[in-house]
Image (tube, grey):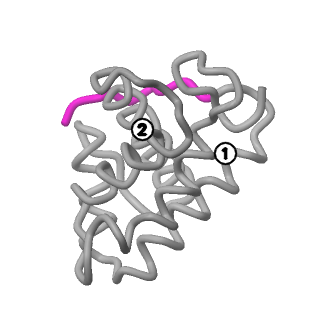
């Protein structure tokens, strides 16, 4: 399956969550989004994609999608890998304007859609 499956949910990929999160970010965050808003946008994207009805599982799926974003950022040289995934994403996010955050999520979605194998994280899922 292309795009990195999220927790085995057929039809919903991490790339889908990343792409929709980029579109939802302005509504979730307001004028000045921060890295926590990226996670909130991922959760909202999963709600809209109907990835799962269980809140805690949606949070875990959002963590997996955030892991994918971090791996993309490191792979493309846009961020340095930090001990925690959230720190990797935060280090990138603080240097972006709102358009840059949305663009980064869209680029990550395109990147993962082009990958032939499912994504598995080498990074931890720490917050």
14 lies left or right of 37: right
69 lies left or right of 3: left
Q: Quadrant of the C terminus?
A: top left
What label sits on residue 30 in the rendered view? none
As helix, strand or loop, the secondary structure at mark 1 comes to helix
Identify which residue, 68 or 18, lies in the foreground. 18
Location of mark 2 (residue):
67
List x then y, in percent, for residue 16. 62, 46
Mark 2, other Cα within 10 Å: few <14 / some 14–19 / many ≥20: many
Magenta span of residues: 119-127
What label sits on residue 112 in the rendered view? 1
- Residue under the point 30% across and 28% down: 125
Whichever of labels 2 and 1 marks the residue nearer the N terminus, that label is: 2
How many labels, in total? 2
101 lies left or right of 11: left
- Residue under the point 68% across and 52% down: 111
**Secondary structure predominantly adopted by residues drawn in magenta:** loop
- Residue under the point 47% across and 40% down: 46
Instruction: Determine the image quadrant of residue 27.
Output: bottom left
List x then y, in percent, for residue 1. 78, 26
Tell which residue pokes out farthest to the top in this image. Answer: 8
Mark 1, other Cα within 10 Å: few <14 / some 14–19 / many ≥20: many
Q: Are marks 2 and 1 in contact (CB under 8 Å)?
A: no
Q: Is residue 80 a member of the stretch shown in magenta? A: no
Identify which residue, 89 or 109, lies in the foreground. 109
Q: Eyeballing the image, is 73 above or below 26? A: above
List x then y, in percent, for residue 80. 36, 54
Q: Is residue 120 a member of the stretch shown in magenta? A: yes
87 lies left or right of 39: left
Question: How far is disc 2 from disc 1 in space, using C-alphas?
Answer: 12 Å
- Residue under the point 37% across and 43% down: 43
List x then y, in percent, for residue 109. 62, 53
């Amino acid at each position: 399956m292309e795009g990195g499956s999220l927790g085995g949910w057929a039809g919903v990929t991490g790339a889908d969550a990343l792409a929709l999160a980029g579109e939802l970010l302005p509504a979730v965050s307001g004028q000045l989004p921060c890295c926590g808003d990226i996670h909130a946008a991922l959760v909202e994207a999963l709600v809209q994609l109907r990835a799962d009805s269980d809140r805690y599982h949606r949070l875990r799926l959002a963590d997996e999608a955030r892991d994918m974003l971090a791996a993309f950022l490191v792979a493309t040289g846009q961020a340095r890998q930090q001990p925690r995934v959230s720190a990797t994403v935060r280090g990138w996010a603080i240097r972006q304007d709102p358009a840059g955050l949305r663009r980064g999520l869209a680029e990550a979605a395109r990147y993962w859609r082009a990958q032939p194998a499912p994504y598995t994280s080498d990074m931890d899922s720490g917050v």
